Amino acid sequence: MAESKDPLQSVINEFKKLPGIGAKSAQRIAFYLTRCSSKECDELSSSITELKDGIVLCSRCNDVSGIDPCRICSDATRDHSQICVVENPFNVHTIEKGGHYRGTYHVLHGSISPLNGIGPEDLKIKNLFDRLREDVAAEVILATNPTIDGEATAHYLKNLIKSLDRRVSRIAFGIPVGSDLDYADEVTLSRAIAGRTVL
């Protein structure tokens, strides 16, 4: 006799595949769904399907969007003289939550990583330079992650962008507000000191 499939365990297993969701969180979400109405579950399922079917990459900045060009690239009130280069679409939404940056973006969809066989040709770099040749962009802000791969990517881009006579800047890294210097690593401390501001 064939063993019947456990639908609850199947849902838990699927949620555990999501980034940042461990076994306990997956269980909590799955049990929460057992208490939801069929309508609520259908709406969740439908929104996930619509996400996959309705998402496109913006042809200008490569951000994930429901329209092309995306709302940021289409927004005439944004400062199109600035392009902030990030590794992933998630980074755009993180910066946007801060509400302080009003320029545009360019999403690379990764970083240069020789150990993983990822070179510049594997990233979305070509259309960045297409934009720099045709746009009014005067400054490129490199906001790649402060990792070995992120630093290598920033260094590679800096050298290429400078040849186009554009200003290149790198986001500052330092000590998070509310943290203790005793817990900061050496790289973070050295970055914080190097990126100090005059008061």
Image: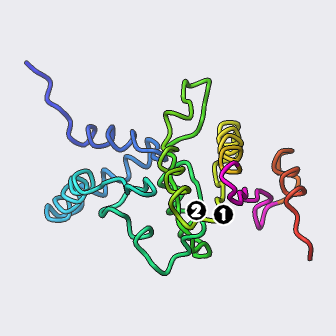
Given the image, on which type of amino acid does mark 2 rest?
A: Ile
Q: Main secondary structure of the magenta part?
A: loop
Of 181 and 80, which appears nearest the observer?
A: 80
- Highlighted range, magenta: 163-179
Pointer 1 residue: 139
Q: Mark 1: give few (<14), some (14-19) or many (20+) Cα within 10 Å.
A: some
User: Which corner quadrant holds the N terminus?
Assistant: top left
In the image, taking residue 183 as reference, residue 124 lies left or right, namely left
Q: Residue at x 43, y 76 (%)?
A: 75
Q: Residue at x 43, y 53 (%)?
A: 62
Q: Are marks 1 and 2 in contact (CB under 8 Å)?
A: yes
Number of dots carrying numbers: 2
Q: Residue at x 25, y 43 (%)?
A: 8
In the image, taking residue 50 as reference, residue 171 lies left or right, namely right
Residue 40 x/y as whole percent: 20, 64
Q: Mark 2: give few (<14), some (14-19) or many (20+) Cα within 10 Å.
A: many
Of 182 and 141, which appears nearest the observer?
A: 141
Residue 92 x/y as whole percent: 52, 60
Q: Secondary structure at mark 1?
A: strand
Mark toward the start of the polypeptide (1 vs 2): 2
Q: Is residue 174 magenta?
A: yes
Q: Tell me the CA gap for discs 1 and 2.
A: 6 Å
User: Which corner quadrant holds the C terminus?
Assistant: bottom right
In the image, taking residue 60 as reference, residue 49 lies left or right, namely left
Given the image, on which type of amino acid does mark 1 rest?
A: Glu
Of 5 and 111, which appears nearest the observer?
A: 111
Pointer 2 residue: 83
